[in-house]
Structure formats: structure tokens, C-alpha cells
Image: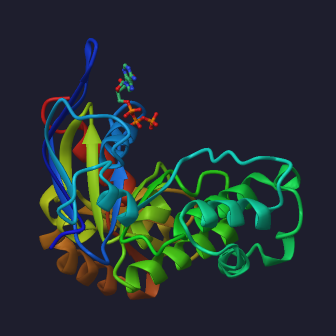
Amino acid sequence: MTSLTISHLTKRFEGVTALDDVGFDVAPGERVALLGHNGAGKSTLMKIVLGLIPASSGSVALMGAAPGSRAARSLAAYLPENVAFHPALTGLEQLGFYLRMRGEPARGAMPLLEKVGLGHAARRRIGTYSKGMRQRVGLAQALIGRPRLMVLDEPTSGLDPVSRREFYAILDELAGEGAAILLSSHALTEVEARTDRIVILSQGRLRANDTLANLRRKAALPIRLQVTARPDTADSVAGQLAGARRNGVMVDLMCRHHEKLARLGQIAGLQPLIEDVEVLPPSLEDLYSHYSRSEGQ
Ligand SMILES: Nc1ncnc2c1ncn2[C@@H]1O[C@H](COP(=O)(O)OP(=O)(O)OP(=O)(O)O)[C@@H](O)[C@H]1O
């Protein structure tokens, strides 16, 4: 059974269609990135999945349960973009409070805080925490009850690079235990490396839903071969390969997938003039603008 099934989901606010016939699934253990420009409909979709607002039409099921039902609420956890906690409580007190609300003993708070790297600050007031530390409290809160579906709204905004890595390591561990993860983000580079599938929304419509490899194949965007010439040979290399000089030593060649090996062969033929070559496939940023512009936008 899929962890999350969304089909023909439409949400209309007065005068705005925030979601228009959207459908995709998330399987157990799968990490899915939900991408889209500001106002694309990501938060609306998450709110419907969590049962916070109703859909206008279509259906959503969390392991067969309706959003907002008791069963769905016990399966899902949510981390909003800006978490807010009581500033006068310590991390330990705040988590203990949430645990008791879920009918679990408060002694579970310390292991959860340690898991998110906050053991050292557990007895400090949350009002003294940095944004990244508060985000970690949010993650610890979301981990209560071992959720089967994690819904995370821009979870790493405000985190430094090391914290981001640690954050994704925790998500990987959860996914390894079979939890499904749906996270929205504008940080395309990090999502590229840390998720299994990409869903792109644009103006409320689903524009893409596939693995990065498949999205690359379907988009068939050009590949960049970045050639580093030896000193004083860049002009000659650019001329012989019909490439574009990027700076004093770099020459860029754009080619299609089927031309790649032939182009690499030509580069190898100029070996005495060449220092190095790198093959750069289209980035998620390139794919994102390709897919969000598609369908006549
Ligand atoms: N309560 C509401 N009433 C009216 N319109 C709304 C409401 N909530 C959202 N919208 C509209 O629905 C559309 C989708 O908004 P949503 O917040 O889902 O976008 P988003 O993809 O999460 O954007 P962001 O990246 O900026 O967070 C927007 O046009 C927004 O103005």
C-alpha cells in the first residue's frame, strides 16, 4: 500500500485555483521533493494532506485513511516552515509536553533531542535558541510516535550547511525504516542529492513527477562539456572544437546526449592542449525551469 495517495486533487479559494487536478503517490521509504514557485500550491497541498483544510474535489488517503481522521493523524507528522514554541520553556520541557499530549512518557524527550543534536541545549530556554536550533526542536517534535509519513514544509530554510546535512541524515534514517517523506523546498541543489523523486507544481498544476534521471532523459536538455585548456591554448582549443571561451583557460561545449561520446573523442584527440574535462549534466535548476515553463507558460 502507498503511504500517501493523491488523485485529481483540486482546491479553489475565492477567485484562485490553488490546486488543479493534481495526482501522485508516495511509497513507504520514499523521499519526494515537492517543488514550485511562490504560490504554486505546495502549502495548500500539505494542508489538505494533513486535514487542516478540505479539498474542493479529488481524494487524498494516508495508508487508506482520510486526512484529519484519527488514523491519519497518528500516521503523519508535520514540520511547518516557521516553527513556534513557547520561549520560556526549555527544549526538554517543550518536548515532554508534546510527548504527554500524545499519551507517551516525558522521559522520551531527551533521546529525541539527542537524536536531533540538541542534547547539550536541552535544559536551556527555547527563547535563547537560534533559528536552526528551533528547527531541530520542530524535527524532534515531528519524530514523536514514529510517523509513517513526514510532511515537511521547507524544513532546511535557515539551517547552516552542516545542520542541513545532519537534517537530511535523520530523514534518510527515517526513510530507511520505511517512513515516507514529502518535503517542499526552494533549495534545489540539496534536494537534487537527497530525494528519490521530484514533483513539480506550477500554478496549481502538476508539471512533473519522476526521478531526476527520468526527468533528465525526458527533458533532453543539452549537456555541458567544460574543457580546461593548457596555458595559452584556449583560443586554439575553442577554435578546433567550435566551443565558447568561458575565461582564460575554460572552453564550454554544449551537446546532446547522443553526441556526448563523439565530442569526448574529439576532446581526447587534442590531448596535448587539454588539462582536464568535466561532463556537466543539466542541473535540477535547469530541469525545474524547463518543466515549470512547459505547457505553454
Ligand atoms: N486561505 C486562502 N485564501 C485565498 N487564497 C489562498 C489561501 N491560501 C492560499 N491561497 C492562494 O493559493 C495559491 C497557492 O498558495 P500556497 O500557499 O499553497 O503556495 P506555495 O506553493 O506554498 O507558496 P510558497 O512557496 O510561497 O510558500 C496562492 O495563489 C495563494 O495566494
Provide residue 81's location: percent of width, then percent of height: 56, 46
Provide residue 167's location: percent of width, then percent of height: 59, 70
Most foreground residue, 216 or 229: 216
Most foreground residue, 211 or 170: 170
Figure quadrant of residue 265: bottom left
Residue drawn at 26 percent across, 12 percent down: 15
Most foreground residue, 107 or 9: 107
Q: Is residue 134 above or below residue 22?
A: below
Q: Is residue 59 above or below residue 2?
A: above
Task: Please state if 291 lies on the left or on the right of 160 as rendered.
Answer: left
Q: Is residue 64 above or below residue 43?
A: below
Examine the rendering and report whether any part of residue 247 can be seen.
yes
Provide residue 29's location: percent of width, then percent of height: 32, 78
Q: Is residue 270 above or below residue 286?
A: below
Most foreground residue, 292 or 280: 292
Q: How is the image coloured?
A: rainbow
Figure quadrant of residue 106: bottom right
- Ligand 1 location (quadrant): top left
Examine the rendering and report whether any part of residue 160 can be seen.
no
Task: Please state if 115 lies on the left or on the right of 128 as rendered.
Answer: left
Residue drawn at 28 percent across, 13 percent down: 14
Looking at the rendering, in which quadrant would you find the C terminus? top left
Task: Please state if 109 lies on the left or on the right of 147 as rendered.
Answer: right
Task: Please state if 83 lies on the left or on the right of 4 as rendered.
Answer: right
Q: Residue pushed farthest top?
A: 15
Q: How many numbered marks appear?
A: 0
Residue drawn at 54 percent across, 64 percent down: 102
Looking at the rendering, in which quadrant would you find the N terminus? bottom left
Provide residue 213's location: percent of width, then percent of height: 23, 71
